[in-house]
Every structure is written in structure tokens, then in C-alpha cells.
Image (spheres, grey):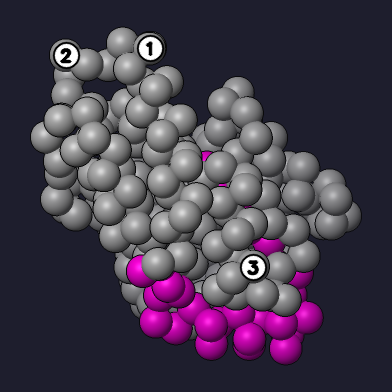
């Protein structure tokens, strides 16, 4: 499992992890727990087609996902059509379309369900914190991964969007677990910045939508290649 530390620092890192005594894990949703790329792309492309705008392929959408649906809508629109009225109209339509299509092709990544089952056996406290709208976050998690999470929280207001740590810290407070005793697992630099801002241990997921380089730049303390690798230091 790849680390972000030189050999001389590995012992110190392991000592730090033992001292932290992790008690809970907060998961990002898209690109971490589930692969939602196709449902998001299909829904957004249907909106673009309605207004006769160019559509995008899956690789393009990989770079657009992670900062909330409103930002996805804005960034998917042609540069000359990003005025507030157009963004608002397309966003409202996207919310309606995606509501009916958010679990069509979306599914947990390989190894995620095994990881969640093992973590529950170990009595770890599990939560979800996403930049996806709260209603969709809850709908997807409850449909695909019911009965695993103590708290499921999506985006309620733009001012609390990650990397603002408000939501992560709110979860920490509700669970009565100190931030430094929590792991935050995500696939983007935004997730790693959120973990840092909240005082949590940021772990980067390489199976998601972003690169190792982005995760390192975002401040990941550790990077894992597969979901089950998280068990190696919990």
C-alpha cells in the first residue's frame, strides 16, 4: 500500500496512527463509495440536449464532479452561456432529471461493501459527508448501502460546501468523537482539504475520479489503491 512518507518517517507515521486510536470513518460519496459517473453524465447531457448545447463524454465529467451539482451544471455549460439565469434554469432541470435517474447505473465500487461490513464488525462508527445535494446523498446511500451509516449528510447550503469543514465537524460533534480520532476517506483534493481543515486524518482513494498527484497536493496523509486497504491501519 503506497504511503506519502519517506522510509525514515514511516515509523513515526505508524506511531502517530496508533496514538490517534481512530474511532470513526467519514466517507465521501461520489468516487469513493459509489461510481455515480454515468448517472450524472446521462442526466446532465439530457439537460444540455434540451437546450441544444454540446454534450460531454465520461472522461470530461470525471473532472467536473466533486463540487456539487450546481458547479457541475455551470462547468458543463458552454463558456458563453454561464450567466446566472441560464445556470439557474439548467440547475433546476438537472435536479428534476437526476432525482429520477440517480440510482439507474450508480453502484458501490468493488470492495466497498466488504469494507463496510468489516468496519461494522469492528464497531467503527461510519458516516457519509458529500457535496451532493442532501436529498440525493440520502437516497443513494439508503438504496445501495442501507444500515451501515450512523449519519448521512449531503449539501444543504453552498456556504457549507467542502472544503468548508462545517459538515465534518458537525458529524464529529453529533457522534461525540474528537476530529483527530476520525479518518476522512475521499477521492479529490477537496476531500483532503476538508479533512485537513477539520483536523481529521485524510486518506485518498485512488479508485475514484482523481489522480494520485491531486490527492497529494490536497494534503492526503495516506493513499490507498483499494477500499479494503483501509483496514491495514484501522
Cα separation between marks 1 and 3: 33 Å
- The magenta span reads 105-131
Place of residue 28 in the rendered image (x, y in percent of width and height, measured from the top left): 53, 56
Which residue: 19% across, 38% down? 49
- Mark 3 or mark 2, earlier in chain: 2
The image position of residue 143, as x and y in percent, is: 59, 70
Q: Which residue is mark 1?
A: 84
Question: In this image, 23 relative to 207: left or right?
Answer: right
User: Which residue, given by chain and number where applicable, does mark 3 sit on?
Assistant: 142
Among numbered discs 1 and 3, the one appearing first in the sequence: 1
Q: Is the residue 192 above or below the residue 145 in the image? A: above
Q: Secondary structure at mark 1?
A: helix
Asked whether the beta carbons under mark 3 and mark 2 sit within 8 Å of each other, the answer is: no
Q: What whole-number distance in Å separates the C-alpha atoms at marks 3 and 2? A: 38 Å
Residue behind mark 2 = 80
As helix, strand or loop, the secondary structure at mark 2 comes to: helix
Amino acid at each position: 500500500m503506497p504511503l506519502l512518507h519517506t522510509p525514515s518517517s514511516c515509523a513515526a507515521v505508524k506511531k502517530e496512527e496508533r496514538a490517534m486510536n481512530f474511532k470513526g470513518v467519514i466517507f465521501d460519496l461520489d468516487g469513493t463509495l459509489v461510481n455515480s459517473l454515468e448517472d450524472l453524465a446521462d442526466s446532465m447531457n439530457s439537460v444540455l440536449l434540451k437546450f441544444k448545447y454540446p454534450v460531454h463524454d465520461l472522461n470530461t465529467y470525471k473532472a467536473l464532479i466533486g463540487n456539487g451539482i450546481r458547479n457541475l451544471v455551470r462547468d458543463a455549460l458552454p463558456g458563453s452561456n454561464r450567466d446566472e439565469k441560464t445556470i439557474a434554469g439548467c440547475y433546476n432541470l438537472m435536479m428534476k432529471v437526476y432525482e429520477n435517474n440517480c440510482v439507474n447505473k450508480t453502484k458501490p465500487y468493488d470492495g466497498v461493501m466488504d469494507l463496510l461490513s468489516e468496519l461494522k464488525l469492528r464497531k467503527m462508527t461510519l458516516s457519509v459527508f458529500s457535496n451532493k445535494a442532501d436529498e440525493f446523498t440520502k437516497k443513494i446511500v439508503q438504496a445501495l448501502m442501507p444500515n451501515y451509516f450512523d449519519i448521512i449528510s449531503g449539501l444543504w447550503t453552498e456556504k457549507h460546501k467542502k472544503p468548508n469543514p462545517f459538515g465534518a465537524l458537525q458529524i464529529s460533534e453529533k457522534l461525540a468523537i474528537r476530529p483527530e480520532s476520525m479518518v476522512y476517506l475521499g477521492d479529490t483534493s477537496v476531500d483532503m482539504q476538508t479533512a485537513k481543515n477539520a483536523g481529521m486524518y485524510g486518506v485518498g482513494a485512488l479508485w475514484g475520479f482523481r489522480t494520485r498527484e491531486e490527492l497529494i497536493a490536497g494534503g492526503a496523509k495516506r493513499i490507498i489503491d483499494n477500499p479494503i486497504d483501509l483496514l491495514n491501519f484501522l
